[in-house]
Image: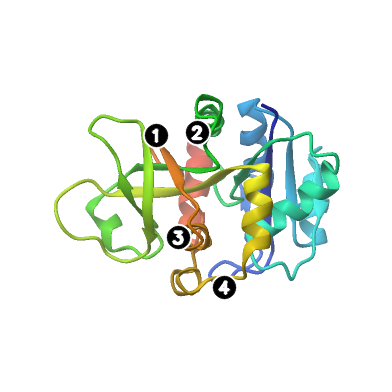
Amino acid sequence: MNPIVLIPARMAATRLPNKPLADIGGVPMIVRVLRQAQLAGVGPVAVAAGDPEIVEAVRAAGGLAVLTDPSLPSGSDRILAALEVLDPEGEHDVVINLQGDMPFVDPDVVRRLVALFADNPGLRMATIVAPEASPADRANPDVVKAVMSLARDADFGRALYFTRSTLYGEGPIWRHIGIYGYRRDALEQFVAAAPPTPLEIREKLEQLRALELGVEIWAAVVADAPISVDNPSDLEAARDQARKSA
């Protein structure tokens, strides 16, 4: 197995414009994500950038970045475009899609996802979930919830659905963490198979396209969800964490 980690990023964001270059303790957020991915040590790491400003910031920090078409509709399209530039011969058979808004993601989370593919040769697409941080997560549309088929005490299982909606009833709530893994051919098929599907558009969650197309998604369970920067208050929380860890 020969993994590669790709981080899609673009400047346009409704709730937090220019998010990838947001300063967190003197370091652009995208550079922090890049460094955490490099610490995982699972393979080469590159940023699939939708804007030249992101490329410049990554290269200034000594990282690798590929400029992709800014009109691409999703992160999956963006990482495939970068992959075709970086690896036209198809040497990397597992692709990790690490979102560019998790500046403190634990490198062990990336390793856990890669290990899931190593231990399960039939796996085609996978992601990561963590327990809810508080009861408020259940009604927060910024917290994507995974509906799981998960045996008691199991550390991975099949994801049945993902939603931003409130989940009711007894049982754990699993927070989805925006990290995906694909077998390379599965990524190529996913991007080529269809345009965004009705559920994907409704929930603004591209993984629902895979489920609508009949692709199984499995998820590994980790202990904690990293800070995900979706809005100005999240950015302040990330800056506070950077100050505390300085």
Residue 245 x/y as whole percent: 51, 33
Disc ID at residue 54: none
In this view, the mark in front (3 or 2): 2
Tell me the SS state at disc 1: loop
Mark toward the start of the polypeptide (3 vs 2) = 2
The disc, 1 or 3, on the residue closer to the chain's N-terminal end is: 1
What residue is shown at x 18% (from left), y 47% (from top)?
171
Figure quadrant of the C terminus: top right
Instruction: Say whether residue 146 is left or right of residue 107.
Output: left
Dot 3 lies on which element? helix
Q: What is the number of the mark on residue 14?
A: 4
Left or right: 10, with 203 as reference point: right
Q: In the rendered view of the protein, which quadrant contains the N terminus?
A: top right
Answer yes or no: do the residues labelled 2 and 1 have beta carbons within 8 Å?
Answer: yes
Which residue is tagged 1?
222
Residue at image mark 3: 233
Q: CA distance from mark 1 to mark 3?
A: 24 Å
Please report whichever mark, 2 or 4, sits nearer to the chain's N-terminal start. 4
Q: Residue at x 70, y 52 (%)?
A: 79
**Residue 165 image offset from top left, x and y in percent:** 32, 66
Amino acid type of the residue tagged 2 in the rendering:
Val
Give residue 109's mark. 2
Residue 176, how many percent across, how many down? 41, 49
First in sequence, mark 2 or 1: give its number: 2
Q: Toward the viewer: 113 or 29?
A: 113
- Badge 3 amino acid: Ser
Q: Position of residue 86 (x, y in %)?
A: 83, 43
